[in-house]
Image (spheres, rainbow, N blue to C red):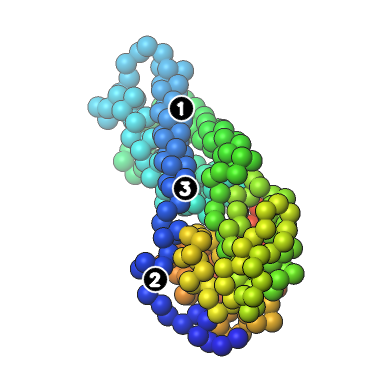
Amino acid sequence: MRAELLAPVDRGPLLPGATDARWVVRYTQTLVFVDLLALILAGALAVLLRFGATETTVAGLSYYGVASLLALGWLTVLALSRCYEARFLGNGPEEFKRVFNACVRVTALVALVAYAAQLEVARGFVGIVLPLGTVLLLGGRLGVRMVLHHRRRQGRSSHRVLVVGSYPLVQELVQQLRREPLAGLKVVGACIPGGQEQVVVAIGPPVPVIGSLTSVIASMAAVQADTVAVTASAGLQGEALRRLPYELEGTGVDLLVAPALTNVSGTRISIRPVAGLPLLHLD
């Protein structure tokens, strides 16, 4: 394949699909709201269970105030732990792992701040609010995911995927993706060598062939794809393939590759499996 496949281009108007995934924005906003609600509830219940109707303070601040500050700090740690990145949401255990790890960090931070500031925070309050907050966060995330999966069964709230590779492998991948609707990867187009076929025949509606291996960037714009899935192909390898992650950097487009193509990665790229599918997600 010629090197000009992935030559630098002006990305400005080419990738409207990368910024038009409105369901992702709404889903993330819903998660923030549910997380905040869970933390506020955990704080209020911890105060009531520990102190009842008694007004108690620490460093001149009521425990309801302490609970509010803790909720905001906790939410910040969740954000810093990348618990709201779209690539981690809606599939597999990674989202829950990140939330749990963030809760562990919050526990450590609470202990550190209390010790450094010599705050006499009631252990009963801490012993209730931290585990309760963790449980409510994980439960809230699970509930929101169940709603998302319901929408995906209806063909909504999914990423728009452009599949790139040889015809038989593209056909196979399309069929696998359609068998896993909860993965949220909806194929909207394909790029195959030569681009001469009009459609890729697979389970369900035929997939339109948008272009060839030399028109990946333009094809992404044509179908407003926010994800590119690359399968093996004799025409897609070598230096041009290794440059693909760098060409997509900063566009907001995710890159999925077949396991056989992991040589596209560099030292600054991490690799993650994708929801039980024969694909790896390049960060």
For the point 41% across and 68% down, the residue is: 14
- Secondary structure of the residue carrying tag 3 is helix
Q: What residue did someone put label 3 on? A: 24
Q: Residues under labels 1 and 3: Cα distance?
A: 27 Å
* Amino acid at pointer 3: Val
For the point 69% across and 82% down, the residue is: 234
**Where residue 150 sits in the image (x, y, percent)?**
61, 36
**On screen, residue 244 above or below 89:** below
* Rendering quarter of residue 10: bottom left
**Where residue 121 sits in the image (x, y, percent)?**
38, 30
For the point 48% across and 71% down, the residue is: 218
**Residue 11 — which label?**
2
- Secondary structure of the residue carrying tag 1 is helix
Q: Residues under labels 1 and 2: Cα distance?
A: 45 Å
Q: Residues under labels 2 and 3: Cα distance?
A: 21 Å
Q: What residue did someone put label 1 on? A: 42
The quadrant of the rendering that contains the N terminus is bottom right
Mark 1 or mark 2: whose residue is earlier in sequence = 2
- Secondary structure of the residue carrying tag 2 is loop
- Report the mark closest to the observer, 1 or 3: 3
Q: Is residue 226 left or right of residue 190?
A: left
**Where residue 79 sits in the image (x, y, percent)?**
42, 48
